[in-house]
Image (cartoon, grey):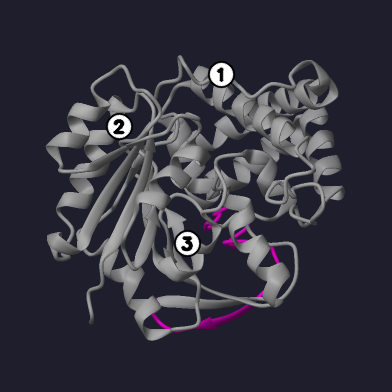
Amino acid sequence: MNKKKISILIPVLNSGSVLGKCLESISIQDYPKENIEIIIADGGSSDDSLDIAGRYGAFIVPNVLKTGEAGKMAALKAASGEYMALIDSDNILPDKNWLKSMILPLEENINVLGSEPISYTWRKEDGFIARYCSLMGLNDPLVYFLGNYDRHNILSGKWTEVEREEKDCGEYIKIIFTKFPLPTIGANGTVFRSEYIKKYTDRDYLFDIDILSEELKKTGKIEFIKVKTGIIHTYCESDVSKFVKKQIRRVRDYNYYSLKKNIREYNWNSMDISGKKPWGIIKFSIYCVLIFPLVAQSITGFLKKRDYAWFFHIPACILTFLIYSWYRLFGYIYTKEMDRRKWKQ
């Protein structure tokens, strides 16, 4: 295998509580150290994030716009690798061969745009929210009802419900998309070819949902790889308040950027992204109002994989429904970009 240079792009903002484990998992990879470039895009951390980054030899660039999407773009603009890995500060690579397993399919398939783990790695020692997200293969329960999730979901037995062509190649699956909608591919361990993703550095933000969408509009066909491995995502651990804050951030960002209709990269309203829209949203709303269908889903999941974290599905859906309903109905009140100055992991 020709071990080409890979740039690992990590946006941080007061991420000291999780960043060390992320960087440690990168440092033990069975991959030439001289071919790994770690770029930290810092949004103005006031904790020990930069000290931790320095201990692992990361190159630090400023992220003046503070958001994770702006951080990814700031890091991308500074990167020089032939592959770009989008790793969040709360990600942990599950084993020392992870980088090799992600890059090998790209070497074998020159036409694919990138690769992504097919699942989130479940660990019993993680918090119940992190375990729930691993079991569901998503961080936002609404995505399950829309069907455009992109990691293996134990409840459905699928990694997505979006229409696509698949070819099982043993250690990975080769995917072909020819039409919208697309799954939410693009974060938490996604690796892109540099020559593809570098075409989009003429902007300030790198949004996960826009990456493949623009290419599909241009070419009418996307080839991608789902590697039969996972990535650890310590999402919120057991902190419900953090889950609520992240859901608020998600819907407020959606409102803010959707208003920028005159800027070509913010095309969320012009494409069928969700898959089952509007039926998925209607079903989600009905389930949240009635509650007992959510209970039934939790029990079904528990019977498939015995973990009481399944029962977080009920409050996760209800909280998401209430938060999204409020901020979508009264979005005209919250027209400014969400303030990140006090953000922390």
| Residue 107 quadrant | bottom left
Q: What amino acid does circle 3 point to?
A: Lys
In the image, the segment drawn in magenta is 151-171
Q: Name the residue under label 3.
A: 198
On the image, numbered disc 1 is attached to which residue?
339
Q: Position of residue 282 (x, y in %)?
A: 86, 41
Looking at the rendered image, the disc whose residue lies closer to the viewer, 2 or 3, is 3
Give the mark, 1 or 2, whose residue is nearer the N terminus.
2
Where residue 77 sits: x, y (%)? Answer: 41, 51
Point 60% across, 27% down: residue: 249
N-terminal label among 3 and 1: 3
Q: Which residue is drawn at 37% across and 52% down?
A: 231
- Write down the residue under mark 2: 18
Confirm whether residue 163 shows in the render. no
**Measured from the top left, where is residue 129 in percent x and y?**
47, 32
Mark 3: give few (<14), some (14-19) or many (20+) Cα within 10 Å: some
**Quadrant into which the C terminus falls:** top left
Q: Assign a secondary structure to mark 2.
A: helix
Q: Give the residue type that dot 2 points to.
A: Val
